[in-house]
Amino acid sequence: MPVTTMGASFLDSLSTSGPWPWLARHPRATRIGLNLSILAALAALVSLVGMDFLGERWQAEAYLLTPKVTVATPAPSSQSSKQHGLDRYAPIAARNLFGTIREKEAVPEPEQILSKMPLASLNLELLGTVVGTDEALNTAIILDKTSRTEDLYRVGDRVKEAEVRRILRTNVVLRTGDRDVVLSMDPEQLAKSQASRPDEGASGKVMILERARIEESLNNLPALMRDARIVPYMEAGQLAGYRLSNIRPGSVYQQLGLVNNDVVMSVNDRTLTGPDQLVSLYEEMTTSGGGGVDLRVRRGTQYETLRYEIQ
């Protein structure tokens, strides 16, 4: 065999000049070891080539066996494609088929509030006003005659000892103490219009009330609160009175001539601005000592004054 011949010549050279005399003395064992070494080297080479081939195959199989993840794009919803704007249903809403649209309640002219309001006597002069749709932004130019200074005021501001309640086109409503007064750009004309206005109420009549009956009703506050529903009434973001509804027949409210949706605004020219003012109505009626009680009421778009004599 070529391997044996090559090993023999190699061993012969080693036997004469190599450093391994043992190999020269045992030629058979040397040839066997050399053959095994060559076979081991060939086996290692084959195994390396096989591992490379198998590695590439395993990678290919792993790639083929790996599940593919596909992100599905949702199809356009048929429901969304059929949606329409709210304006499509405007004709239905305009016809008010379900009775959900109520007519806006008519608001009385602001000047009607001044019909029974006393003129301010604070040594002030109203020089002008700036009035818009938002009453909170209305502005009044008021001159203090004492200091001869003028300034701009809005609702809620204080001028001297008064508070600005409302700013109208030619008038300003001020709160002094527990009553409202009016500061006008033309106080003489306002005074004439107030004097020429007829007394309001039920044909100008005075209602006679029995003191015992009124005291009996007013002393039973729980029943009094059940006889009608009383809720605050706001104007320009401020409390302007109390609205009555669900008035029971035969109750003290009915005896006073009040009807559903009446707004009680003042008692004896004192504006109702809180529950304590509402209680003052009861006190006036029980302690009037035979005197009269004037109740200022807004009824619909009109203002009326209900007058009572307690005997």
Image (cartoon, grey):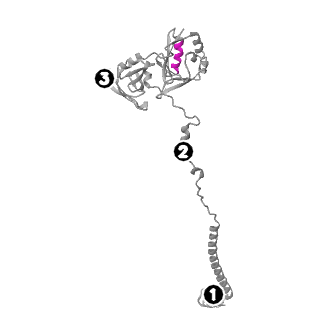
| Figure quadrant of the N terminus | bottom right
User: Disc 3 and disc 1: Cα gap in Å?
Assistant: 138 Å
Amino acid on which the number 3 mark rests in the picture: Arg
Amino acid at dot 2? Arg
The vertical placement of 91 against 44, above or below, is above
- Mark 1 residue type: Pro
Is 237 on the left-hand or right-hand side of 37? left
Q: Earlier in the sequence, mark 3 or mark 1?
A: 1
Q: Residue at x 56, y 10 (%)?
A: 211
Residue 42 seen in the current view: yes
Q: Is residue 190 left or right of residue 305?
A: left
Badge 3 crowding class, 10 Å Cα cut-off, few under 14, some 14 to 19, many 20 or more, is few
On the question of residue 176 being in view, the answer is: no
- The prevailing secondary structure element of the residues shown in magenta is helix
> What span is in magenta?
275-285
User: Of marks 1 and 2, which one's residue comes earlier in the chain?
Assistant: 1
Please count the marks in the image.
3
Name the residue located 48 percent from the left edge and 22 percent from the top edge: 302
Who comes first in sequence, dot 2 or dot 3?
Answer: 2
Q: Nearer the viewer, residue 54 or 217?
A: 217
CB within 8 Å, label 3 to label 1: no
Compared to 177, does 234 lie above or below? Answer: below
Q: Which residue is mark 3?
A: 148
| 9 up-or-down from 307: above or below | below
Residue 264 tag number: none
Residue 21, labelled with which disc?
Answer: 1
Residue 33 placement: quadrant: bottom right
Q: Which residue is mark 2?
A: 88
